[in-house]
Amino acid sequence: MENRDLERKVNDARKLLGDVKSEISKKIVGQNAMIDGLLMGIIAGGHVLVEGVPGLAKTLAVRTLSEALTIDFKRIQFTPDLLPADLTGTMIYRQQTGEFVARKGPVFTNIVLADEINRAPAKVQAALLESMAEKQVTIGDSTYKLPDPFFVLATQNPIEQEGTYQLPEAQLDRFVMKLKINYPTAAEELEILKRMGSEKPITINRVLNTITIAQLRKAAESITVDERIEKYIVSIVTASRAGNQKHLSFSRYIEYGASPRATIYLYRCARIRAMFEGRIFVLPEDVKAVAFDVLRHRIVLSYEAQAEELSTDDVIRDILAAVSVP
């Protein structure tokens, strides 16, 4: 009976996710991996970093997702001259009362689109890190809680490096996933041309709200994870730490491995992926499917890896091949 209830709950969640994807697909052609990743980040209760060259609908996808949600959304364009107060807010003097009061910035919302996040300097990144890590903001002497739910969906361009700043590892680790977006296929681009070339307004119906997001989270949390799968997840993350795995050939390519936060999010995302597939239990394939997005921004490559022009995805592929599947 419990399995029947769980199957019904998962099927309801899958139908709801299908409705969301159907609305988003009115504007976004293809890019299914990006849409799944954005939804997975929201359900997992974390933040998502999207990386891709200009014109691949990164910003449009986040904005379209926000249109399908009945929660607040704000977009912040990150620039080199951005100040922390432009993000979090500042204290202003109220002449009528002779007091300083907090004027809250755009980060006080449910979804923040941090567009071109790597263009902002260190002080701005530090201010954003507090909101990402603690879901709170300090203005003057006071600390204010951010709305619930709160998500940062950030974009960055991998090819344009002039006027950009590398994100601190501590901040990168706060992102549940780093999604890499590729060019559409010829058939998808033809569909984009037909659909978006006329510039006709496209209406997106609101499907998700705070209640339905909570329902999706409960459905994901009810997915069964066998102890062997849990050990498999831990083995993948610990294999990324070169100091623990010196006997493995790929260890020389890793300077620093993934943190325990990677273990937690790999576990959560594997559950959510199983829910996406309509299953009430997690398979090793679910773990493998989300491993690249969860780990690629958490592994720091060594000089030797850079010299051999290896990417983190190459190293993750070696890790998955080396760790035995239950």
Image (tube, rainbow, N blue to C red):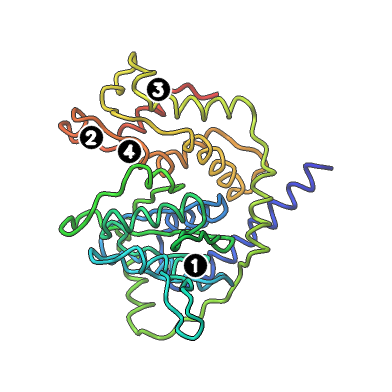
What residue did someone put label 3 on? 322
Q: Residues within 10 Å of mark 1 (few under 14, many from 20)?
A: many
Q: Residue furthest top?
A: 247
Disc number for residue 310: 2
Determine the CA span between mark 3 and mark 1.
44 Å
Determine the CA span between mark 2 and mark 4.
8 Å
- SS state under label 4: helix
The answer to which of marks 1 and 2 sits earlier in the sequence is 1
Which quadrant of the rendered structure holds the N terminus? top right
Q: Residue at x 28, y 60 (%)?
A: 120
Determine the CA span between mark 1 and mark 2.
39 Å
Determine the CA span between mark 3 and mark 4.
14 Å
**Which quadrant would residue 249 be assigned to in this image?**
top left
Q: Nearer the viewer, mark 4 or mark 1?
A: 1
In the image, residue 42 lies at what x, y percent? Answer: 53, 56
Disc number for residue 108: 1
- SS state under label 1: loop
The answer to which of marks 3 and 4 sits earlier in the sequence is 4
Mark 3 residue type:
Ala
Determine the CA span between mark 3 and mark 2.
17 Å
> Is residue 221 shown above or below 28?
above
Circles 1, 2 touching at the beta carbon (< 8 Å): no
Q: Nearer the viewer, mark 1 or mark 2?
A: 1
Q: Nearer the viewer, mark 3 or mark 1?
A: 1
Q: Nearer the viewer, residue 67 or 166?
A: 166
Q: Nearer the viewer, residue 302 or 85?
A: 85
> Is residue 204 shown above or below 17?
below
Disc number for residue 313: 4
Q: Residues within 10 Å of mark 4 (few under 14, many from 20)?
A: some
**Which quadrant would residue 319 be assigned to in this image?**
top left
The answer to which of marks 3 and 2 sits earlier in the sequence is 2
